[in-house]
Image (cartoon, rainbow, N blue to C red):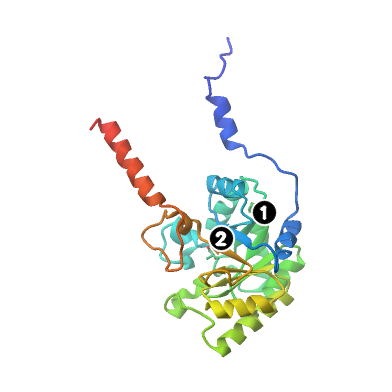
Amino acid sequence: MINKPPPRGGFLVSITRCVAPKSPTVTALQKADSIRAHKGGRPVTALTAYDYPTARLLDEAGIDILLVGDSLGMVVLGFPDTTHVTLDHMLHHVAAVARATPKALIVGDLPIHTYETPAQALETARRLVAAGAEAVKLEGGIRQAEKVRAITEAGIPVMGHLGMLPQRVLEEGGYRKKGKTPEQTEALREGAQALIDAGVFSIVLESIMPETARLLTASLAVPTIGIGCGTQTCDGEIAVITDLLGSFPWFVPPFATPEADLASATRTAVARYISRVRGS
Ligand code: KIV
């Protein structure tokens, strides 16, 4: 039997399209430490990513952190909020992002109901790490401190998340601004300190009044990474990738600053394709 060469550009191209470039191994702890070292220095840049091509593109652009956030429930899976996200959803998307072997730190969200006790939090964190996450994030302050400690003591870096907590949106009856009063501000500060004492390397601050976010940032020992807290109030910023790219036009949070309009670009491209195929 004669071995035929692969069709030009066929076999080889499909291999090279799927294999990400290898980078020298930097451990997850080293990456998390280098994020922590940004405190008071160059702002930390973070974006969500839920799939392989997006992770590669964001990493090639030089982003510091790729968060496989449970926002994937809304902007990828079509649920009304993040309370529908399961661990299986997260594992599937963390694995896709990890296949991009990014230089950026891959953080995976612990979904709702998967960290009710320290033992369960550690087990969930381990499963995310086995799927390719290098760090995990969970929502809440003082009442999560023992869970954070269980995870950090096992050598897995943890990112905190304070302010508006999307996993509590149903209890709270909507997405509300936090840190409006001195009492709320003090509760946030105490929560942040409990997370820091438990070993977090950074804390996301979501939808906190700009002045409060600035005060917290000045008083905390780890980088704060803001979303919906105003500009230059934190040690860095995080955005949901679909908000940045304008690819989820049906709900755009008031604080989003799109840098592109991929929804329009997609509609135009598809309309052209339909015309071309129909010959019209
Ligand atoms: O899930 C997510 O995308 C997040 C960000 C909003 C910080 O937690």
Question: Residue 172, how many percent across, how many down?
Answer: 46, 80
Q: Residues within 10 Å of mark 1 (few under 14, many from 20)?
A: few
Q: Is residue 4 left or right of residue 251?
A: right
Closer-to-camera residue (40/168): 40
Closer-to-camera residue (213/203): 213
Distance of label 2 from label 1 (alpha carbons): 12 Å
Q: Residue at x 55, y 52 (%)?
A: 92
Question: Residue 138, how many percent across, how many down?
Answer: 61, 69
Closer-to-camera residue (238/157): 238
Point out the tag, 2 or 1, that comes first from the N-terminus.
2
Q: Residue at x 58, y 9 (%)?
A: 2
Q: Residue at x 58, y 31 (%)?
A: 15
- Counting labels gives 2
Which three-letter amino acid code belongs to the residue tagged 1?
Ala
Which residue position holds label 2? 87
Question: Residue 41, how many percent across, how many down?
Answer: 70, 65
- On-image quarter of the N terminus: top right
Whether residue 141 can be seen here: no
Q: Is residue 248 left or right of residue 119?
A: left
Question: Residue 115, how many percent across, how many down?
Answer: 61, 70
Which three-letter amino acid code belongs to the residue tagged 2?
Leu
- Callout 2: CB less than 8 Å from ligand 1: no
Q: Residues within 10 Å of mark 2 (few under 14, many from 20)?
A: some
Which residue position holds label 1? 130
